[in-house]
Image (spheres, helix red, strand yellow):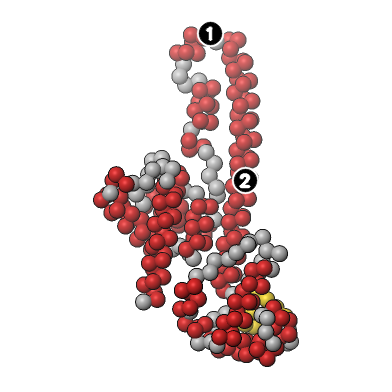
Amino acid sequence: MSKLAWFQFYPRDWLSDPDLAQCSALTHGVWINLLASMHTGERSELTGTIGQLARLGRCTESEMTRFIAEAEATNFCDVTECHDLVTVSSRRLKRDERERKSAVSRQRKHREAVSDSAQSSERHADVTAKYQNVTSDSVSDSSLDQSSDTPETETKKHNQSPLRLQQPEWDPDDLWLRNFLAGEQKVFNSDRLPLLLNPDFWSDLSTAINGLDLPFVRAEFAKMAIWKRDNPARAPTRAGVRRFVASWFCRAANDRRKQLRA
């Protein structure tokens, strides 16, 4: 049974798909049943004989044969045949599966980095405590007060520096986004930028709006800069900056889909 209780479904995209629109109502019904079976099995393709696929598609074998013929003719999904076995796969579900695996990998690396950081902090604390015990016997309190650059002070500054806070690790394919956020965009800086430099946030947002690319992100941040300049009193707070950016990109993605369908 799938751990995911639902999958994203956009009725307008379904109805406006030019390849699927050429198919019969029978093929539409069989395809949605196969998609549900893929989701339930947490996979992006189904392989079996005509009879086995017919049972998954809730149709007869002759109807499944017709479905395969229409799918091959219109290419709304991928169909491959090898001997008596047929494989039907969804390109959209394959992409979603890759993104989920990438997110799981980033989260695992983040947890490992946090664990390593905690162990490192404990080692630093032990070293600092030992140094305090040694220096307290040989240096007076007054001389310690006058010294501002002792190794102990440097260690504390090093550990307390906000730059030492661990961030989730970026996927190599998403480094363009991190570089853009940290270098090119000027809309959110200072205390708001660290909240946006989170790969998990952008991975979830990318999944929600069906993908991000540099021209799209650059254009939307330019629009944000204009809006923020014209509405300084309505600029998002530190706590609400992620919600603001997510809502902005969701609206922009919907507008882009409408323009493509127009």
| Residue at point 50%, 61% (across, down) | 208
Q: Is 115 on the left-hand or right-hand side of 202?
A: right
- Give the residue type at disc 2: Arg
Q: Residues within 10 Å of mark 2 (few under 14, many from 20)?
A: some
Q: Is residue 104 left or right of residue 245?
A: right
- Residue neighbourhood size for the residue with mark 1, other residues' Cα within 10 Å, grouped as few (<14), some (14–19), many (≥20): few
Where is residue 142 shown, x and y percent of the image? 48, 8
SS at circle 2: helix
Q: In terms of secondary structure, where does tag 1 sit? A: loop
What residue is drawn where x is 42% and y is 56%? 247
| Residue at x-position 50% and y-position 20% | 150
Q: Position of residue 169 (x, y in %)?
A: 55, 49
The image position of residue 225, as x and y in percent, is 31, 52
Where is residue 113, by image quadrant? top right
Rendered view: 55 above or below 155? below
Name the residue: 67% across, 84% down: 59
Which residue, given by chain and number where applicable, does mark 1 sit on? 140
Which numbered dot is residue 111?
A: 2
- Quadrant holding the C terminus: bottom left
Towards the viewer: 30 or 101: 30
- Which x, y percent locates residue 55? 71, 81
Q: Earlier in the sequence, mark 2 or mark 1?
A: 2
